Image: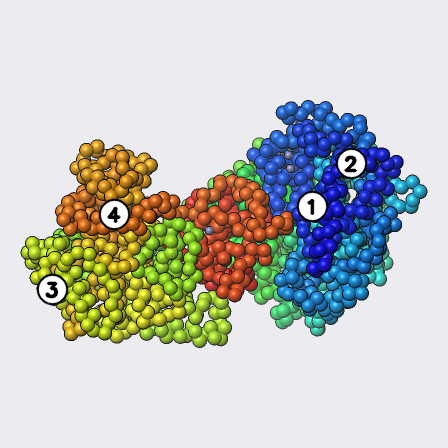
Amino acid sequence: MADEEAEGAERMEVSTELSQAPQRQASWWDQQVDFYTAFLHHLAQLVPEIYFAEMDPDLEKQEENVQLSIFTPLEWYLFGEDPDICLEKLKQSAAFQLCGKVFKSGETTYSCRDCAIDPTCVLCMDCFQNSVHKNHRYKMHTSTGGGFCDCGDTEAWKTGPFCINHEPGRADTTKENSHCPLNEEVIAQARKIFPSVIKYIVEMTIWEEEKQLPTELQIREKNERYYCVLFNDEHHSYDHVIYSLQRALDCELAEAQLHTTAIDKEGRRAVKAGTYAACQEAKEDIKSHSENVSQHPLHVEVLYSEVMAHQKFALRLGSWINKIMSYSSDFRQIFCQACLTEEPDSENPCLISRLMLWDAKLYKGARKILHELIFSSFFMEMEYKKLFAMEFVKYYKQLQKEYISDDHDRSISITALSVQMFTVPTLARHLIEEQNVISVITETLLEVLPEYLDRNNKFNFQGYSQDKLGRVYAVICDLKYILISKPTVWTERLRIQFLEGFRSFLKILTCMQGMEEIRRQVGQHIEVDPDWEAAIAIQMQLKNILLMFQEWCACDEELLLVAYKECHKAVIRCSTSFITGIKTVVQLCGHTLETKSYRVSEDLVSIHLPLSRTLAGLHVRLSRLGAVSRLHEFIPFDFQVEVLVEYPLRCLVLVAQVVAEMWRRNGLSLISQVFYYQDVKCREEMYDKDIIMLQIGASLMDPNKFLLLILQRYELADAFTKTIPTKDQDLIKQYNTLIEEMLQVLIYVVGERYIPGVGNVTKEEVTMREIVHLLCIEPMPHSAIARNLPENENNETGLENVINKVATFKKPGVSGHGVYELKDESLKDFNMYFYHYSKTQHSKAEHMQKKRRKQENKDEALPPPPPPEFCPAFSKVVNLLSCDVMMYILRTILERAVDTDSNFWTEGMLQMAFHILALGLLEEKQQLQKAPEEEVTFDFYHKASRLGSSATNAQNIQMLLEKLKGIPQLEGQKDMITWILQMFDIVKRLREKSCLIVATTSGLDSIKNDEITHDKEKAERKRKAEAARLHRQKIMAQMSALQKNFIETHKLMYDTTSEMTGKEDSIMEEESTPAISDYCKIALGPKRGPTITEKEVLTCILCQEEQEVKIENNAMVLAACVQKSTALTQHRGKPVELSGETLDPLFMDPDLAYGTYTGSCGHVMHAVCWQKYFEAVQLSSQQRVHVDLFDLESGEYLCPLCKSLCNTVIPIIPLQPQKINSENAEALAQLLTLARWIQTVLARISGYKMKHTKGENPVIPILFDQGMGDSTLEFHSILSFGVQSLIKYSNSIKEMVILFATTVYRIGLKVPPDEMDPRVPMMTWSTCAFTIQAIENLLGDEGKPLFGALQNRQHNGLKALMQFAVAQRVTCSQVLIQKHLVRLLSVVLPNLRSEDTPCLLSIDLFHVLVGAVLAFPALYWDDTVNLQPSSISSAYNQLYLFHLITMAHILQILLTIDTGLSLSQVEEDSEEARCASSFFEEISQYFSSCAGHDAPGWYLWAALKNGIIPYLRCAALFFHYVLGVTPPEELFTNSAEGEYNALCSYLSLPTNLFLLFQEYWDTVKPLLHRWCTDPALLNCLQQKSSLVRYPRKRNSLIELPDDYSCLLNQASHFRCPRSADDERKHPVLCLFCGAILCSQNICCQEVVNGEEIGACIFHALHCGAGVCIFLKIRECRVVLVEGKARGCAYPAPYLDEYGETDPGLKRGNPLHLSRERYRKLHLVWQQHCIIEEIARSQETNQMLFGFNWQLL
Ligand SMILES: [Zn+2]
Ligand SMILES: [Zn+2]
Ligand SMILES: [Zn+2]
Ligand SMILES: [Zn+2]
Ligand SMILES: [Zn+2]
Ligand SMILES: [Zn+2]
Ligand SMILES: [Zn+2]
């Protein structure tokens, strides 16, 4: 390497010299006759120099050199003047009409559903935002790369083809100068230069010699430098390549990674430089290391260094000309002309075609640049686009074949450009007319598919390769693109060429007709399930193509008839085996059918019949055009309808037999195929067409013969003639199922007329009917309806056009989605035997509709709705209903049902028979209403009422129905039978009455009349229903009374269960506040009210036993979760110590950046029960039952009841009742002033100090600023104000206290557990303070009152937490607590200072308050007796501590006051305002300039009041849960003004807070002095930016834009901070701080503690202390993460207009922010429920475990 660098440096000098004269170079070229030779000479000299250091290039230098020595001279030569000036001029005038922006993978594209010609027409984000389509119905999608923006293409859009920026004639650009104003000379120069440039690019790109250059470039002495070059492929994994390189080259991991990343991006890279032999050796090494049994070796080549250099430069030159072309249309045209010129005396195609044909051999990076070149030249000029398209089609077959054998993704293949040309309507038409492109594509298919042909010349995809077949789909797709816009004008040539294409297409269908035949397996089960996916996938691909072919054919009658003839011929040709088969005869009730003997259950059958189905489609279109009558002109000989019907019929029989479980042994593959056959993705060109084919058969055949054929094929002829032995239950069941299936198909044949051409309906009516039937099952969201409707070639379902006619939209709540509900008036269209219902849908819908009718007190009959009329071509189908065989079938079924011994029928079968009867009667009624009686030949009524001749036929259908009505088992069918009998009556009357009367009575009316005659029955029913309702009501009342009682007696249990169902009970337990009105509601000082305690009996959720909570009893515990939190931070993203090993947590920073939150789900257990449970969980995890669900090592488990994630338990300790004798207290007040109290405390502390100095305990340095004052006060005087003996907790409770305290310590500081650590008590106080602050903040955020709105779990958690904290002191060394206390007190006691006392502005005083109050009793400890203060002493201690700390906080607030707030003005000269002013004067003497210096008094007071409230609220919560004193009423309600006064009263504060200072002035003055003169404080004040002000700001999730497009827009501008490439990125937005991160990408991974973690997880560590909420922008998904390994998805707060989220942007509808849902997400965060959500979702959705959250 060393010598290479030296050499390189020397060479560089040469080029710098050269570069100084680009102008000179240009003029030299000017003098040359042959520019090409001169240009090559120049390049041959320079290129190898510049691109010398391939292995380790200085990219900037390279670029600079190329610019100076090649491009600038070229530009000079081109423009003849300074190119910079010239290009600037061009830029000014250049306005394109086409945007042409090429999409990178992952970019968002927009399509307008109203205006785009087809869904492939898309806009880039910029164009979209500036277009009219922004306000239309648009779709957003993520590009897979390779497409380009269609803005400006008038053929792509019905309206609004231009955005504002690309509109012609906009601003100063008129039509003329939108063409570039190039002068003749420049154009002449371009004509000279461009061909040479292109030639060089092409020659070098397709250069194949590894060892040498083309002769023109060989002007230098040949060196011996080669590269070993590795190419990208799609088979080897990243890791495999890295591994192979490391082994073969013996290099470091990092280097191998670097190579691999570059190879993946660029497609090739030199991995070694050296002599030919050395490189050859490396090549072999890499190959052998990368090869194994299942994989080919990697593709490696050895390349001569200069070849590599020239190839590299050729691409750079490509980018250069790309840039030049963007300036002018003339340039583009000259370029295109040059590309299309064929060399005069050469066999070679033109240059662009040579490039195209070389595409599959090129590597990724080269392809990209070449495709871009095509985009920016040919595709920007319509005329040349056409010429390019023609070249493309010329070589289409070859290109596709190469693509199919290539291994690169489609997106970087030249074949992917087809969509850009084929979807342009004029181009498509041109290509069909001139180049017969349809035939070209189909023939390509015919050439690539034979690989899959079997010996019958049918396709068979067994053992196919998915990847390869996937590539064939691309060709099929091209067919779709060509057909996507139907021509409006047909020329003769177009007609001829299209028909030729159609014929060619029929050849493909011929290979599919009857492919993959199967035979029923009897005896043994098949061994391997055959591959079926490929054939079905092709069906899916073809569905819309088939439909489009049919639509094109239907453009005119002639065309359609010719196509029909061709298709008919093809079908008959495929049916020869059937035509020549053996015959058999079927007979029934005097009718005979001679047909071929064939049994689906024995012979071969196939479900792939695209030819038959195409014919059915063409037939329907023929019927729509009314041209069926001309059919005989084209098919003069035998139409052979039986042959046409045969194959579709077999297919339907196959389905029936599968349902009857006759094909069990053929395995799952058949079940899947049958599923897809009827599924919405395929059914239009499979199942639906088979039904139509039967309808064609029924319309053209004799009805009796048709039915005999059906019976024969269903293998049911015997079942209706003979009596089957009744022993074999399975066989009976099988027969019954087959009969049901057959009846259903008959119902469809007669009743399904909702296809334009079959019945007189419009497309909209068809869609409407589909929707009605979906909604009859249940109300559905938009997406579910859309999923169940077939999509057309433009991916549209037509849903939006009609949905509002049949359904109403119901908006979603905070969760769930919006749904459509069917309108009542559409219910009448419900058809129980709707042919697109699956079995389950059918029964669900039937159930729903019956239920509904019952609720409305209607009868339960669900007769078919009157069907629309058949088109004339199909009108004869109805004759099926009244033919003899049908009557025979119906009668047989009814007779069997009447016969009590027969089990040869089912209720379902009967229902179908009723349905057919109903259809027949409806048909007759409709006909009678339309025409005079004598003209109506359809005679259902008479046939059904006629008696049969034989004995078995002795009863007519009506009589049978009457009998059935009496059978008790058929109670459910009674209403339907009644309905049918009524219909018989109606038809009879219509037949009897004269036509005149009939005509005036509409059908509906007559039914109504009948209903009136049944009024009585109805009234009776109503009465019964009413009685039943009353009865129900009574029972309900009794039940609810019982329930109430139960709740009262089992209050706690009720609470827990209601919690479990997720309801947030927000009422405090009433028991804790009984008749409190008399008590004094003051928590502090001599007037303190009594503790309200009562017996607490709790039930263990594990053993269900009750126990009273007492300090001497065994402990009961609350399930709890301790977590670090940044929910309150004023300083988001503040760097966190990853381990708290050295942290001193006694003082909390005022920014509350990191706190320790303790939450509980409120569920109670015995400590013993919990321990047993936890051990059991541990055991089961060893057996890997709960893998990964939670981290047992850190004590995690799921609450046994509610399954929230917990990691510890809080012991439940009862409140110690305390009561103060108020007289004593008053007396003491005279004695114990603040000053005296302070002196007593100081005396005690100094006493300890003296003792400790003498004794063995280490000393903490304490500084007493001044004299000790009253010397009469000595060590013991503190005890004289009242003491009591220490509370004795049971050992079990102590144990739990220690356990919980250790957990808080461990998690809060992220350290290993150590119960003896001196910081354990600090963490106890800290979590108490922080948890209270978090809850107070949340209550404020939600606008709830302080008390009375707490959730039960919060209330129970706080209660347990505070009492635990009181008890925790007892489990520690008292000396330790004293030490901590002294440090805390040194903040607020005058005279007392420890060296490390922080300044007033760098601590949170609420934390100080909590710590000091909880630690204070330690001052009463003595070696000999362990005492604690009496109630009355405590009252004073707490009062004075609180007052002192409050004063300190007041100072904090005033010092940091923000003078810019808009506070509503209060009284100008109130007492408070005056006090504020004078106080401020007092303190401002310490500061030269102070923030609130010139603020008026009222403002200071208002700001103080505003700032102190959160602190007061926290203090009230704290003292309430420590002391149990009932707070005043006002704190239970929501009133801001009342709240302040109530807080002051509860906390024994004067409402004018300044009075505190006045009262204690002498004591406070020195303190003020000390605080204010602290240099650290002054320092703090100066750093304004990090100053915390009060009230602290409330955190919320970042503002999100209303329109999701805006976020996508932001994401599109996102660049990964670590890598400069344009590869696809996954931008993820942190909802805490708004940072956008590069997720799931190696470039942004970080290493923490030796583990690699993704950018998001790393960010979360700092931003949310490991817990975070992210929005994956490209996917519109929210993810919650916690720690390294856990996370879950959460519904995004963006909804479409149908109230649905769109994860993955699959549907692409416009999305808007739902404020409610975003708010809910905010609350999940602020309630510290993120961890809980994650645990819950993991519990319910174990599927997601596969995701590696660590790398997010
Ligand atoms: Zn655009
Ligand atoms: Zn545009
Ligand atoms: Zn539009
Ligand atoms: Zn228990
Ligand atoms: Zn629970
Ligand atoms: Zn963040
Ligand atoms: Zn990155």
Q: CA distance from mark 2 to mark 4?
A: 76 Å
Q: In terms of sequence position, does the residue under pointer 2 or pointer 4 come before the other?
A: 2
Q: Is mark 4 within 8 Å of ligand 6?
A: no
Q: In terms of sequence position, does the residue under pointer 1 or pointer 2 come before the other?
A: 2
Q: In terms of sequence position, does the residue under pointer 3 or pointer 1 come before the other?
A: 1
Q: Pointer 4: what residue?
A: 1572
Q: Are marks 1 and 4 in contact (CB under 8 Å)?
A: no
Q: Pointer 1: what residue?
A: 63
Query: From the viewer's perspective, is 783 left or right of 468?
Result: left
Q: Residue at x 71, y 71 (%)?
A: 527
Q: Residue at x 71, y 55 (%)?
A: 6
Q: CA distance from mark 3 to mark 4?
A: 30 Å
Q: Are marks 3 and 4 in contact (CB under 8 Å)?
A: no
**Category of crowding for the residue at label 4, using alpha-carbon neighbours closer than 10 angstroms: few (below 14), some (14–19), many (at least 20):** many
Front residue (pair 731, 601): 601
Front residue (pair 1603, 1203): 1603
Q: In terms of sequence position, does the residue under pointer 3 or pointer 4 come before the other?
A: 3
**Category of crowding for the residue at label 2, using alpha-carbon neighbours closer than 10 angstroms: few (below 14), some (14–19), many (at least 20):** some
Q: Pointer 2: what residue?
A: 24
In front: label 2 or label 4: 2
Q: Pointer 3: what residue?
A: 1274
**Category of crowding for the residue at label 1, using alpha-carbon neighbours closer than 10 angstroms: few (below 14), some (14–19), many (at least 20):** few
Q: CA distance from mark 3 to mark 1?
A: 85 Å
Q: CA distance from mark 2 to mark 3?
A: 102 Å
Position of residue 214 measured from the top left corner of the image (x, y, whole percent): 86, 50
